[in-house]
Amino acid sequence: MAPLLILALYTGALLLFILTLLCGENELFARTPLPKMHYLLTEGAGSGIASLARRCCGQRGPALLATVAELCCERSNPAVQVLFLALLGSCLWAYCRFIFPLLPLPGIPSWHKATGAAAALLCLSFFLLASFSDPGTITPANVSAHLALYPWDGLLYEQKECWTCSLSRPARSKHCATCNRCVAKLDHHCIWLNNCVGLANMRWFLAFLISTAAVCAYGAALGLAVLRADLAEQDSWNTAFLHPDTGEVVYLADSWRFVLAYLSARYGPQLALTFFTAAAGWIVTGFLGYQLYLICAGLTTAEVHKRRVLASSLALAQEAQGVEQRVQRALAGGDGSGGTGSTSAGTATLVLGRGGGARPDPRAGSGGLQQPRTQVQPLLQPAALPNFYDRGLRRNLAEILFPRHHLRAAATAAGGGTQKAD
């Protein structure tokens, strides 16, 4: 298979993978194959691996997998943090080993060595800030201030007490089982940071995502520019080669297939680094875009999940109520009396169709009159639920960038200025 075709398939598969993970559960894609693909990549893959482990190792296999998943995803541990540091450090070392020695080149000055290292260190700084900063832990000293920041909406949040912390749970807060603490405006627990992302450190988490996406884009652009400049300086475009199949004299510029084969042979590490940073940049940029969308909409990742569960519950209740009404109409129309639903040929047995129609079973006799099918109301979508916490784009962003200021302002407005807001 041609290298260019392999590259195109790889890029397309990567973009589809990112889109499926980020948008597979979004109601906008409910009528597309993305929900099924999302299930296969998440729950389906987990079930398949557990089934394979059961066949290979008996009951010990799934138990071992569950233990590993709990250690990696449900308990606080620095394993994934170390993985990120290893990836960042190895990429910086590889650039110092394979890319930076080729500088300077025409149009690419040598100061890119310093700016590249500085960009990696900036990314590392934001990673450490997001990892070790307080996400907004709720304590007896600041619970009054957090209670004043957001009201209970009676939809997703109601007044209740956290049984573990023995504190009144403010709206938009959640108890993180991994960190064993209540976090204000909890978005999610990030295994890459080994820390929760909440009200107080969301700005550092966004800075980490932006810096990571920027350093990946910078690395990919620099790698591509270095490859092009070095090819031009070596006059490789006019270099003649013998075609391995036909034996004819060909030039590198004649086909992209020759270019990719030549780059793989002569610039293997440089090409691999460029593709890796480009792929990582796509993934981080996709997640960054989704996070920015949630912020602009006044939502958190936890709230998106809660709204989806609530919409599904309300839709099921709505559907059950509709089925009950259709059954009652069918029973009432069986003999025109609205009583027992019997006919002159005997009691009619009801059959519920997928379209919502309720009718007597034809096998019960000819006396049962079929009820007309009624139009089924569309099921409730999460987007139809009201969002009382969307305060507009400007206010939503301000709460992310200056959380302490808004927390103190809310506490003061509620008469709790003497309470600590940190």
Image (cartoon, rainbow, N blue to C red):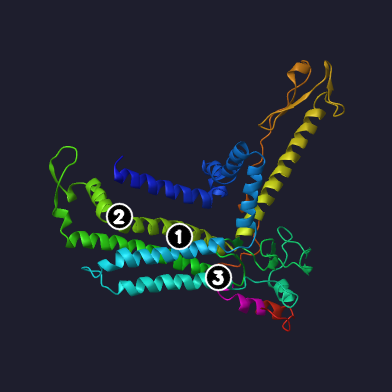
Q: Quadrant of residue 221?
A: bottom left
Q: Secondary structure at mark 1?
A: helix
User: Could you say which is closer to the camera, residue 137 or residue 149?
Assistant: 137
Q: Which is more foreground, mark 1 or mark 3?
A: 3
Q: Which residue is mark 1?
A: 285
Q: Which is more foreground, mark 2 or mark 1?
A: 2
Tag 1–tag 3 contact (CB < 8 Å) = no
Distance in Å between CA atoms under marks 2 and 1: 26 Å
The amino acid on which the numbered mark 3 sits, given as a three-letter code, is Ala
Residue furthest right in the image: 339
The amino acid on which the numbered mark 2 sits, given as a three-letter code, is Gly
Label annotation for residue 130: 3
| Horizontal and vertical percent position of residue 261 | 25, 48
What span is in magenta? 396-408
Q: Residue at x 26, y 50 (%)?
A: 260
Q: Is residue 360 left or right of residue 236?
A: right
For the stretch drawn in magenta, what is the main secondary structure? helix
Label annotation for residue 161: none
| Horizontal and vertical percent position of residue 317 | 73, 44
Tag 2–tag 1 contact (CB < 8 Å) = no
Q: Which residue is mark 2?
A: 268
State the quadrant of the C terminus. bottom right
User: In this view of the protein, can residue 186 be seen by the observer?
Assistant: yes
| Horizontal and vertical percent position of residue 207 | 49, 70
Mark 2 and mark 1 lie on one chain; the one further toward the N terminus is 2
